[in-house]
Amino acid sequence: MRILYHHRTRGRDVEGVHIRGVVGGLRQLGHEVAVMSFPGADPEQEQTHGAAKPKRRGHLGALVSRMPGVLFEVLELGYNLVTLVRMRRAFARFKPQLIYERYSLFLFATLWLARRHGIPVILEINDSALVERVRPLWLKSLARRIEGWCLRQATGLVFISSYFQQQARAAYGDIAPSVVSPNAADLARFDPSRHDRERLRAERGVAGRVVCGYVGAFVHWHGVNGFVEAIAARLTEVPELVLVLVGDGRSLPEVRDLVQAHGLADRILLPGRVPHNEIPAWIACMDYAVLPDSNRYGSPVKLFEFMAMGVAMVAPDYAPVAEVIDDGRTGWLFPQRELLACVQRVLQLAAQSDERLRVGAAAREYIVRERQWRNNAEQLLGLLPEAQR
């Protein structure tokens, strides 16, 4: 089947990982997949060498990202005209039999045009006018009307969490057939057998230590700064424990200041941002991991990548996380927003090597069995009528 994957994201970081994952899963199943990206944003052009550096955006992407408030949303509406032109060309050149689109607010042109051509469209819902967003939504009523139309008119819907699915059904009623498909991991990359764990631990200065890790953005909704502040005074209780917190973001300077203020540079390591292809080697150094906070609707990609590496995670019990982690079997849950409970579990596990190994092995088994990108691809294709698969 010829599948056109369309998205309007920057195609970087977690967005790029997810797009490459779904596209790769579809190709593994033998389908021909073309990717149509926002101008200047190609997720298949992944940075693979050298230190991680911010990628340059296309001129249009840079302009749009700086637009304030309602002007930004007017441009999002206007992008439907660009999409119509590009889609018409793609239809003539590629002749897709299915369009898989990563849903974006105010974007309806793909679905409108595809319906006129009799081409099925499956929408992947990672964002919504119904949830609290990082960037405030000004034209909320219009966004919801467009969103409701899209979710009712699509051939099928892929929600990344049941929270999104439930919100959409409550708000829009009789939406298209849907599935809940959390994120996944690429086992070709996230394979612990490919890494010399002891050598990597020696190179990173954590040989002989118990390592609890984090990989991801240093942003307020992941709660890394609060976690560091809460655990700093208690690290003396577990002298063998070291935290390795990989990534960057707005709250990284605050975390660095906390580490320096508490004199914990040898107990809390902050390597900064690393290219995605180097992340498995960092995870291979870790005994277990922590996600201090998340949100009600997200499905963190790093959760799946840690589990694929046989490294289980201490994580908050938000519904999308609890859909993936079976507490005490494939990870450990703590009550959301209760940092002291998170810290306590992290400290306890530092002395429980058998528990860490048992749960880590079960976590990898779960990913191998159910949460490879190929599984996601099979699930989304199941939304098509049998005659079109």
Image (cartoon, rainbow, N blue to C red):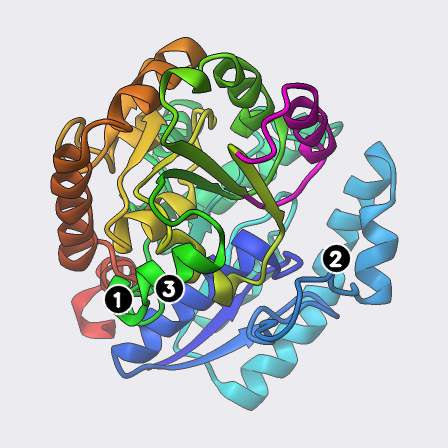
Mark with earlier residue (1, 2): 2
Residue 310 colored in magenta in the image: no
The residue range painted magenta reads 246-266
Q: Residues within 10 Å of mark 1 (few under 14, many from 20)?
A: many
Residue underneath mark 1: 374
Disc 2 secondary structure class: helix
Q: Which residue is mark 3?
A: 199
Most foreground residue, 331 or 221: 331
Q: Is residue 280 above or below residue 105?
A: below
Looking at numbered disc 1 in the image, what kind of residue is underneath it? Answer: Arg
Mark 1 or mark 2, whichever is nearer to me:
1
Residue 67 location, x and y as percent? 87, 43
Q: Give the residue displayed 38% in from the left and 73% down from the top.
A: 24
Q: Residues within 10 Å of mark 2 (few under 14, many from 20)?
A: some
The kind of residue tagged 3 is Arg
Q: Quadrant of residue 384?
A: bottom left
Q: Position of residue 273 (x, y in %)?
A: 62, 52
- How far separated are the C-alphas under marks 1 and 2? 31 Å
Quarter location, residue 27: bottom left
Q: Residue at x 88, y 54 (%)?
A: 63
* Residue 107: numbered disc: none
Quadrant for the C terminus in the image: bottom left
- Left of 254 or right of it: where is 243? left
Residue 73's image quarter?
Answer: top right
Residue position for label 2? 79
Q: Secondary structure at mark 3?
A: helix
The disc, 1 or 3, on the residue closer to the chain's N-terminal end is 3
Q: Residue 33: where, in percent of width, then height?
A: 43, 79
